[in-house]
């Protein structure tokens, strides 16, 4: 027997794994991808593909597909100004074997945007997968790093201008997750 939503009673609704993100300009993604490939070749691990390089603002996790418009609506209420970010450092998180890029100085608007997205998502009834104070802005460049004491490459500062943020769906595959933008939201509007 089918319910009004078209699914059988007792069936779980289709889920989408989602997060809010910033995407770099193509030139910045190209530069970061080259660093990721080189580092993974030297230290082992899986480099992040160029088209997957992003900065996560808020990870929401699994959401019923039919509720995605509600999440999008909550995000449309979030306001922020466009901002520049400069990635100027590399590091390795030993506990989860991740090589990442970050900034020595993050603009306040970045943290405010992340906090506002988490608060809006929570207020709309979505469990946010991370605690509000745990935002560590970073760009994952390689996972499963084999040699944790590898020499880090020199970091040529990479500018990144942000004029919008995105709601992204993540679909796991054998070669890493594939990302699809579900919605985009302008900053400064």
Image (spheres, grey):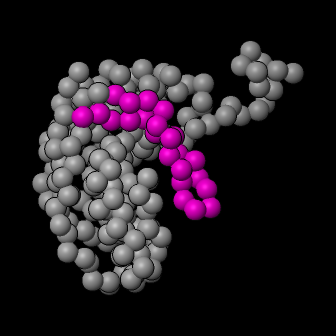
Residue placed at 71% from the left, 19% from the top?
5
For residue 65, above or below residue 52: above
For residue 109, above or below residue 101: above
Residue 154: tell me if it is visible.
yes
Q: Quadrant of residue 140?
A: bottom left
58 left or right, relative to 156: right
Quadrant placement of the N terminus: top right
Residue placed at 21% from the left, 43% from the top?
161
Q: Position of residue 162 (x, y in %)?
A: 24, 40
Q: Position of residue 79 (x, y in %)?
A: 24, 25
For residue 111, above or below residue 26: above
Q: Quadrant of residue 28?
A: bottom left
Residue 95: tell me if it is visible.
no
In-front residue for pair 31/174: 31
180 left or right, relative to 116: right
Which portion, as a residue range, is magenta? 163-185
Q: Quadrant of residue 19?
A: top left
Residue placed at 24% from the left, 29% from the top?
187
For residue 15, above or below residue 143: above
Q: Position of residue 171 (x, y in %)?
A: 58, 47
Residue with the most extreme top position: 4
Residue placed at 39% from the left, 81% from the top?
43
The majority secondary structure of the magenta stretch comes to: strand
* Residue 48 included in the magenta stretch of the image: no
């Amino acid at each position: 027997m089918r319910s009004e939503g078209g699914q059988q009673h007792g069936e779980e609704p289709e889920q989408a794994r989602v997060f809010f993100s910033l995407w770099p300009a193509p030139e910045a993604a190209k530069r970061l991808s080259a660093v990721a490939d080189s580092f993974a070749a030297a230290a082992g691990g899986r480099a992040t593909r160029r088209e997957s390089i992003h900065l996560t603002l808020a990870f929401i996790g699994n959401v019923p597909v039919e509720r995605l418009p509600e999440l999008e609506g909550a995000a449309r209420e979030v306001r922020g100004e466009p901002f520049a970010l400069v990635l100027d450092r590399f590091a390795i998180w030993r506990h989860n074997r991740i090589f990442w890029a970050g900034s020595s100085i993050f603009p306040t608007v970045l943290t405010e945007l992340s906090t506002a997205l988490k608060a809006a998502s929570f207020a709309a009834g979505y469990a946010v997968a991370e605690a509000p104070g745990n935002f560590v802005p970073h760009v994952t460049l390689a996972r499963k790093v084999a040699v944790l004491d590898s020499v880090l490459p020199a970091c040529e500062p990479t500018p990144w201008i942000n004029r919008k943020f995105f709601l992204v769906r993540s679909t796991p595959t054998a070669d890493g997750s594939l990302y699809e933008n579900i919605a985009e939201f302008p900053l400064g509007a």
